[in-house]
Image (tube, helix red, strand yellow):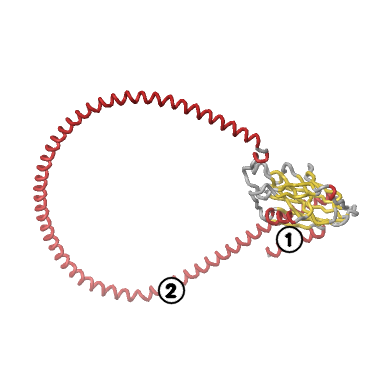
Amino acid sequence: MLKNTLLLSSLLLFSGCAERGYQLTTQTSTHTLTAQSSVDISDTQVQTNQELLKMQDAIKKERKKKRTILKAKNTITETKTREKEERVNAKKLYDKKVLQKELEARKAKTLDGKRLALQREEEMGRKHRLILEEKEKKKHQEEIKKLAEFKVKKQEEKAKALEANMKKSAQEQALKKEKSLKLEKALQIKATLAAQEALKAKEIAAKNVEILRLAQIEEAKVIKEEKEAKVKRLQEKKRKKANVPIEKRKKSSLLTSTQSLRFQLINKIYHKFGSSEVHGHVIYLTPSGQETRLTGSKVYILPISAKLNHWYENYYLKNKNNPNTNGTVVNYLNSTYLNLEKNFEFYGVAEGSYYVIIESNYPSHIARNKKVYIAKKIQVGKHKKIMAVFSKKL
């Protein structure tokens, strides 16, 4: 029942959007959701601001619908798991009862047999006890004999160890006397050598004093040369930094999620002036789902080209960045900024296929001096007013 109700509600929402002429598209890779419609410019009943507000409501309903579907799925899975657990528990209880009944029946049958077996075991036990007592008495006597023999052997071993210790102590005393005589002779030799070395040390100390004085003079010269070399290196670095262009100095510390774009205005000679309009509204959402405003939001309308298609398919949709390049250079027809109400407008657009790209700055707490993009392909017909609402989750 829950699945049927969810399917019906989703069909009703999509049918409501279709009746109003809205086209909802979602891109999970870029976290964007857009609503788009196209009407004739001659239709004066359609007001752009009201239509954009309705499309905003449609996007909000779509996001709420997704949340409710996820909640419903979670509840269905929870109920299924509960039912499975209850079935398993019921089977376990039934099996336990059956086992208990079988065990009781078996016990009743085996009680009579056990009584007879116990009587037989008692008779056999008496005989077995007598045999064990006799065996234990024999073991006890054998252990007493073994202990007596073990004590005699230990006494003999102790006597032998005492004799060996006495011999060792006598030998050690003799060795100590010999060592003391050798030490006395060695000390006398050391004393004579020390006196000779003291005289030599005095002579060497006098020479070392002179060598140290000369070394200090040389060290002072080396320190001066090193200081002069450091000053020269710092001056060269400053000179090189002054010659480096500003673009090379400003290197971003964080990577952007999408390859950056560098926009170039198409020469006015090749401008096509048409009779259609493009109106839009941009919504940026925080990870928690709250609406936020980004700085430096600029909107570009660009004719479709091979380079733009390559960027859109290989970088934008896949959230990739090529660190070896400074950005993709693209040509645009016209550009504008978002107003206070986060709306934008393009007039005099010719018939054809275009990309609408919104470029904004990331919030400072996410990334500094980095760009976030929303890109969408649109088809512009003759004398048409195209309205679109772009929603992106950061």
Query: Whole-percent x and y of residue 354?
Result: 79, 54
The residue located at (74%, 52%) in the rendering is 375
Residue 386 located left or right of residue 253: right
Name above or below for residue 280 compared with residue 15: above
Task: Say whether residue 70 is visible.
Answer: yes
Name above or below for residue 102 compared with residue 52: below
Q: Do the residues under discs 2 and 1 have CB atoms within 8 angstroms?
A: no
Q: Residues within 10 Å of mark 2 (few under 14, many from 20)?
A: few
Which mark sits nearer the N-terminus, 2 or 1? Answer: 1
The answer to which of 247 and 72 lies nearer the viewer is: 247
The answer to which of 224 and 18 lies nearer the viewer is: 224
- Element type where label 2 sits in the image: helix
Reading the image, the residue beneath label 2 is 102
Query: Image quadrant for the N terminus?
Result: bottom right
- The three-letter code of the residue at mark 1 reads Ser
Q: Residues within 10 Å of mark 1 (few under 14, many from 20)?
A: some
- Element type where label 1 sits in the image: helix
Count the labels in the image.
Answer: 2
Query: Whole-percent x and y of residue 228?
Result: 53, 28
The answer to which of 109 and 54 lies nearer the viewer is: 54
- Which quadrant of the structure image shows residue 179? top left
Residue 73 located left or right of residue 204: right
- The three-letter code of the residue at mark 2 reads Glu
- Which quadrant of the structure image shows residue 237? top right
- The circle on residue 10 is 1
The residue located at (42%, 25%) in the rendering is 216
Residue 279 located left or right of residue 230: right
The residue located at (56%, 30%) in the rendering is 232
Query: Whole-percent x and y of residue 265?
Result: 79, 46
